[in-house]
Each structure stands twice: as structure tokens, then as C-alpha cells.
């Protein structure tokens, strides 16, 4: 059962978030949560929250369809980070000039699915 979660306008740069997403893409969902829990990067927090939300969405969909659910069968099928809007700020520089600071945002998307061998099991 496929489930998707998305966090938009997250105040972390897309390049930093992509570094974290690349580490967990394709892994089991439970294993990826543990990796993200102990990752030192600041972007790991928002990515972990999106992953946990996708897992909760999968559980909800299984409950609605009256199917058996085991979160250990979930894996990250797709995970990507898109660039959100950039907030432009200015900082005073020498000789009356202004230097621009770009505060970038990200849209983080995670799609989890069951492994192909585990999909064949029946209903509750």
C-alpha cells in the first residue's frame, strides 16, 4: 500500500536536505527512521518527521481498507526535495552597500510502499 507525505516551505536549503534524503532512499522505513534519529545534520529532523508521517498515512490507509499492516515491510520507494521560494534579505556592507542573503526553503516529499513479496499476503 503506497502512502505519501509532504512538508512544504521547510526552512532548510534543498542541497542540505538532498544530502540526507540520498542516505535513506530505498531503505526500509523503520531503518531509515533510526538512521535519521542519530544523524548529526540539522536537515535530518524535518526529513524524519515527513517519513514518520508517510508511515502513519500508510497505517491509516491499511486500517481504512481493513488490511493487515506491518511497518517493517515498508520501504522508501521515492524521496525527493524540491526547491521552495527563496526569502531575500539584505545585510549592510562596507561603503553603504547592501549584500543580499538568500534564505532558501524546501519542499520535502517521501513515498513509502510495501515490498513486492509482502504485498501478496491476504486481508486480516
Image (cartoon, grey):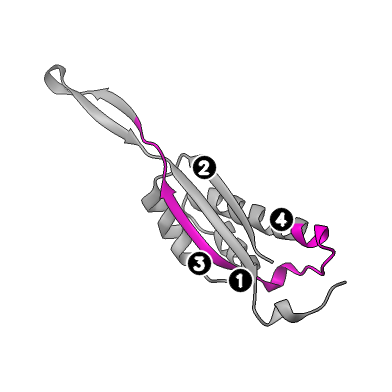
Mark 3 residue element:
loop
Q: Are marks 2 and 4 in contact (CB under 8 Å)?
A: no
Q: Residues within 10 Å of mark 4 (few under 14, many from 20)?
A: some
Find the distance from the CA under tag 2 to the CA under tag 1.
Answer: 23 Å
N-term-proximal mark, 3 vs 2: 2
* Residue for badge 1: 28
* Residue for badge 2: 8
Q: Are marks 1 and 3 in contact (CB under 8 Å)?
A: no
Q: Are marks 2 and 1 in contact (CB under 8 Å)?
A: no
N-term-proximal mark, 2 vs 1: 2
Q: Residue at x 55, y 57 (%)?
A: 110
Q: Nearer the viewer, mark 2 or mark 1?
A: 2
Residue 56 bears which disc, if any?
4
Q: Quadrant of the N terminus?
A: bottom right
N-term-proximal mark, 2 vs 4: 2
Find the distance from the CA under tag 1 to the CA under tag 3.
Answer: 9 Å
Q: Is residue 22 magenta?
A: no
- Is residue 120 placed above or below 12 in the rendered structure? below
Amino acid at each position: 500500500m503506497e502512502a505519501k507525505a509532504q512538508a512544504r516551505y521547510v526552512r532548510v536549503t534543498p542541497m542540505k536536505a538532498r544530502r540526507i534524503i540520498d542516505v535513506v532512499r530505498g531503505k526500509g522505513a523503520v531503518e531509515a527512521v533510526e538512521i535519521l534519529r542519530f544523524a548529526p545534520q540539522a536537515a535530518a529532523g524535518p526529513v524524519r518527521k515527513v517519513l514518520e508521517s508517510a508511515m502513519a498515512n500508510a497505517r491509516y490507509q491499511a486500517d481504512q481498507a481493513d488490511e493487515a499492516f506491518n511497518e517493517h515491510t515498508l520501504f522508501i520507494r521515492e524521496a525527493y526535495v524540491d526547491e521552495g521560494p527563496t526569502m531575500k534579505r539584505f545585510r549592510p556592507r562596507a561603503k553603504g552597500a547592501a549584500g543580499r542573503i538568500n534564505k532558501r526553503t524546501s519542499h520535502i516529499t517521501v513515498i513509502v510502499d510495501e515490498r513486492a513479496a509482502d504485498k501478496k499476503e491476504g486481508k486480516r
